[in-house]
Amino acid sequence: MNGELWAGNYFNYFTEVEEHFQRARGSSLFLMSPLDWALVESWKNTGVPLEAVLRGIDDAFEKYRAGKRKNFQQVNSLAYCAQAITKASADMLNNRPAKPIASAEDSVPSDGLRTALEQRAAQLTAKGFADAAASVNAILGNLAEHHANLEDLEMRLGAIEEKILAQARAAQSEEQLLEARRALESELKPHRGRLSAAEISMLEKSFLDRELFARLGLDRLSLFFLL
């Protein structure tokens, strides 16, 4: 997959899921929760096709309407659609036709990418993550080559994030770990019945990683969060 097509697919995944859910719900003012974003990230990371997510959202709301519950404001999380999305994904694996995902022209401008990475490197240095900052600066030193292969760049940035998370987890107190777990359970509890064990496991990791970055006061390195 070339860089432009990969970038288009990557950014479309997050933005189209958010916009499609808002349209299905009937409210453009709805803001997805940290749990919702973690769920989208877990679907992307496990290879659930974008079309399966969009189709599952539609199927879930059709079922909701068939139940004659007119107050769509009660659907306040993407987790409501999880089972329908799992089924839609399975249907696609059985060769059900899917719509192609549109590509995008240069979705990651080189100048903007350089500025964002420079900001992340400075932030990591200020927060005491010198090794991670050095890794980002190494990318900046050969940015033209990395910009030509965005998929590989995203994997490199993900590896740096994992190093940051490992260092930060080791430094957390037991009380901080417990607080993060309580926040996760508070968000997840109403939706456990709609999620499989595998989905819950992936969701927990994504949610806790996001919470830890927020606690550290660090911005994410993923291309989706950079620009």
Image (tube, rainbow, N blue to C red):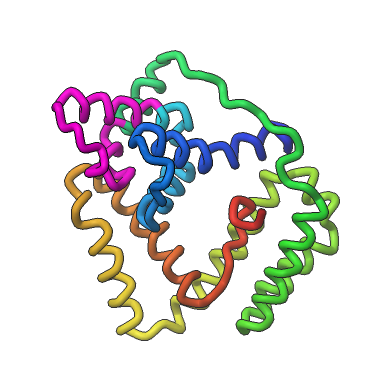
Residue found at x 37% / y 55%: 33
Q: Quadrant of residue 71?
A: top left
Residue sitting nearer the eye, 25 or 96: 25
Vertical order, 91 against 70 (above or below): above
Using the rendered view, name the quadrant where residue 162 is placed.
Answer: bottom right
Q: What main secondary structure does the magenta stretch of the protein show?
A: helix
**Residue at image location 46% in from the left, 84% down from the top:** 171
x, y percentage for residue 103? Answer: 66, 29
Q: How many marks?
A: 0
Name the image quarter holding the N terminus: top right
Answer left or right for 99 relative to 221: left
Q: Residue at x 33, y 32 (%)?
A: 85
> Between 105 and 67, which is closer to the camera in this rendering?
67
Q: Is residue 169 magenta?
A: no
Give the residue drawn at x 47%, y 31%: 49
Residue 60, position as x, y percentages in the image: 27, 30
On the image, the x and y values in percent for residue 116 come to 72, 62
Which range of residues does the magenta coloring cover? 55-84
- Regarding residue 47, the answer to whether it shows in the image is no
